[in-house]
Image: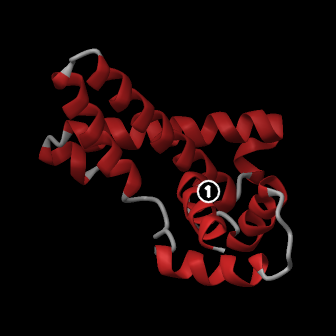
């Protein structure tokens, strides 16, 4: 309500997008019981999907030379990201990866699954993948 009263249209639009995405994810997962069964992990997952979609849109608009739309998407992404939990820093990701690399496994896919299971959604898969590749090269 406060954003509406202030006339902060970017924030209002972003919040509406978040609510819509959460509802859509809940309906897809739970059907008619969506409102009763939606959980915090479902909500975080929906907000992450929305943030990813904004990043992809920014990239596409930059390629198309649409700076006006890039600015709008970046502003909305900023609002959406403010509702996401803080991600692990690279140093923490490296600490998690270290013991997993000690197992002797060399298959990247197997390692990535183990690392992502240990990280449990606390970091973006792309970042984790880049760090894992870097650590494998140094090994």
Q: Is residue 82 left or right of residue 121?
A: left
The residue positioned farthest toward the left in the image shown = 6
The residue positioned farthest toward the top in the image shown = 64
Residue at position x 83%, y 58% in the image: 107
**Residue 77, how many percent across, how many down?**
34, 44
Q: Is residue 7 above or below residue 85?
A: above
Give the class, few, some or many, for how many residues have Cα within 10 Å of label 1's Cα (few <14, many ≥20).
Answer: some
Most foreground residue, 53 or 137: 137
Residue 75 visible at all: yes
Most foreground residue, 46 or 58: 58
Residue at position x 46%, y 70% in the image: 86
**Residue 63, how many percent across, how many down?**
30, 20
Residue at position x 74%, y 84% in the image: 99
Q: Is residue 33 above or below residue 44?
A: above
Quarter that holds the C terminus: bottom right
Q: Is residue 64 left or right of residue 119?
A: left
Q: How many tags in the picture?
A: 1
Residue 32 visible at all: no
Residue under numbered circle 1: 129
**Residue 49, how many percent across, how many down?**
56, 42
Q: Is residue 131 left or right of residue 38?
A: left
Among the 4 quarters of the image, the one containing residue 32? top right
- Name the colouring of the figure: secondary structure
Q: Is residue 83 left or right of residue 95?
A: left
Considering the numbered disc 1 on the image, is that residue within a helix, a strand or a loop? helix
**Residue 6, how many percent across, how many down?**
13, 47
Among the 4 quarters of the image, the one containing residue 55? top left
Residue at position x 74%, y 60% in the image: 112
């Amino acid at each position: 309500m406060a954003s509406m009263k202030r006339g902060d249209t970017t924030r209002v639009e972003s919040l509406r997008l978040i609510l819509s995405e959460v509802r859509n994810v809940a309906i897809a997962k739970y059907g008619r019981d969506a409102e009763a069964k939606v959980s915090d992990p479902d909500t975080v997952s929906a907000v992450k999907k929305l943030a990813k979609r904004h990043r992809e849109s920014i990239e596409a608009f930059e390629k198309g030379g649409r700076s006006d739309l890039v600015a709008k998407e970046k502003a909305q992404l900023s609002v959406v990201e403010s509702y996401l939990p803080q991600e692990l820093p690279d140093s923490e990701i490296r600490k998690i990866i270290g013991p997993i690399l000690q197992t002797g496994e060399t298959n990247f896919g197997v390692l990535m699954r183990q690392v992502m299971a240990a990280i449990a959604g606390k970091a973006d898969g792309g970042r984790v993948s880049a760090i894992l590749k870097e650590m494998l090269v140094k090994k």
